[in-house]
Each structure stands twice: as structure tokens, then as C-alpha cells.
Amino acid sequence: MKIKITTSCGSVARSFTAGTEPTVADAVGQDLIAAGYAELLDPEAQPVVAVSEPTEPTEPTGE
């Protein structure tokens, strides 16, 4: 997955500098995008994982 780093960040295994455009594993890219550290480049060419909308709580069924 090709992403653009918007905020410098890092972990034990790797670090990213704001403004760079690395290609990363899909799971890493999705985590960075979800955390707000990156944005997806060329979303037309890559699958996007849908995020479910929050739902209203339901009443207990009493079971």
C-alpha cells in the first residue's frame, strides 16, 4: 500500500518522516491511516477497508 506520512512517527521496527511516501504492508498502512499519521495515495488503485458506523445501543432481550 502506498501512503503519504502526514505526521512523523515510529515504532521499534521502523520510523517514518512527515512528507515521505513509503510503500508499506496493508495492515501497517491501515493502522497509520486510522491513527491519523498517514493518508492513502491513489485510493482508486487500492482497496479501502470499510469502517462500520457506530450503532445505537439496543435494549436487553432478557435472556
Image (spheres, rainbow, N blue to C red):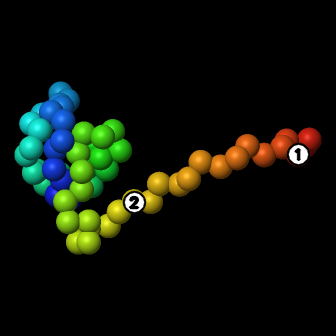
Secondary structure at badge 1 equals: loop
- Single out the residue that lies furthest toward the top: 12
User: Which amino acid lies under the numbered mark 2 shown in the image of this protein?
Assistant: Val
**Residue drawn at x 9%, y 36% as measured from the top left:** 17
Image quarter hosting the C terminus: top right
List x then y, in percent, for residue 38: 23, 45
List x then y, in percent, for residue 12: 18, 27
Whether residue 47 is situated above or below residue 7 in the rendered picture: below
Viewer-side residue, 25 vs 50: 50
First in residue order: circle 1 vs circle 2 = 2
Image quarter hosting the N terminus: bottom left
Q: Residues within 10 Å of mark 1 (few under 14, many from 20)?
A: few
**Residue drawn at x 24%, y 51% as measured from the top left:** 39
Whether residue 27 is situated above or below residue 14 in the rendered picture: below
Whether residue 55 is situated above or below residue 17 in the rendered picture: below
- Single out the residue that lies furthest toward the bottom: 44
- Single out the residue that lies furthest toward the right: 62
**Residue drawn at x 19%, y 60% as measured from the top left:** 41
Task: Identify the disc placed on residue 20.
Answer: none
Would you name the residue on which mark 2 appears?
A: 49
User: Which amino acid lies under the numbered mark 1 shown in the image of this protein?
Assistant: Thr
Whether residue 56 is situated above or below residue 18 in the rendered picture: below
In whole angstroms, how far apart are the C-alphas of marks 1 and 2? 32 Å
Secondary structure at badge 2 equals: loop
List x then y, in percent, for residue 21: 10, 51
Q: Residues within 10 Å of mark 2 (few under 14, many from 20)?
A: few
Q: Is residue 28 visible?
A: no
List x then y, in percent, for residue 45: 23, 72
What is the quadrant of residue 43 in the picture?
bottom left
**Residue drawn at x 88%, y 45% as measured from the top left:** 61
Would you name the residue on which mark 1 appears?
A: 61
